[in-house]
Amino acid sequence: QVQLVESGGGLVQAGGSLRLSCAASGSIFSINTMGWHRQAPGKQRELVARITSGGSTNYADSVKGRFTISMDNSKKTVYLQMNSLKSEDTAVYYCNTVAKEWGSGYATYWGQGTQVTVSS
């Protein structure tokens, strides 16, 4: 089984920065992508940013220029550097990965989520 452990959430003032981390562990044979989604109260979960094992990235329009995703393949860890935070970035942030376990096909795994609250 693949486990994802997130860290780095918290409370920050508008205009501030936070860095989220997510480490994958377990019987992982290969990682295809890692990424971050978020869900605000009363809203659907949405993609924030995604990165492939080759380093290709894509971002939601709302975070382009403010957030940067990166991945350390050797540590199976993905990071989300969030700058110029706005109150509308307040949400629970979920890490996910599309990964392959030994002897299995690719599947999507999710972390437990970490709260990010931006005060205005």
Image (cartoon, helix red, strand yellow):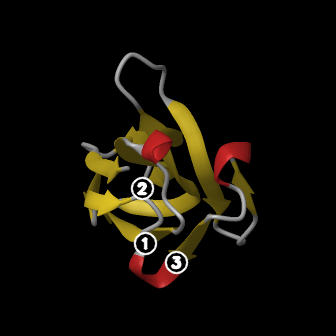
| Image x and y of residue 89, in percent | 47, 45
| Alpha-carbon span between mark 2 and mark 1 | 15 Å
Q: Secondary structure at mark 3?
A: helix
What amino acid does circle 1 point to? Lys
- Residue topped by disc 2: 102
3 relative to 105 in the view: left or right: left
The image quadrant of residue 32 is bottom right
Say which mark, if any, is on residue 112: none
Q: Nearer the viewer, mark 2 or mark 1?
A: 1
110 relative to 5 in the view: left or right: right
| Label 1 close to label 3 by CB (< 8 Å) | yes
Specify which label sits upstream in the sequence, 3 or 2: 3
What amino acid does circle 3 point to? Asn
Specify which label sits upstream in the sequence, 2 or 1: 1
Packing grade of label 3 (10 A; few <14, some 14-19, many >=20) is: some
Packing grade of label 2 (10 A; few <14, some 14-19, many >=20) is: few
The image quadrant of residue 109 is top left
What amino acid does circle 2 point to? Trp
- Residue topped by disc 3: 73
| Image x and y of residue 58, in percent | 73, 54
| Alpha-carbon span between mark 3 and mark 2 | 17 Å
| Image x and y of residue 77, in percent | 42, 71
- Residue topped by disc 1: 76
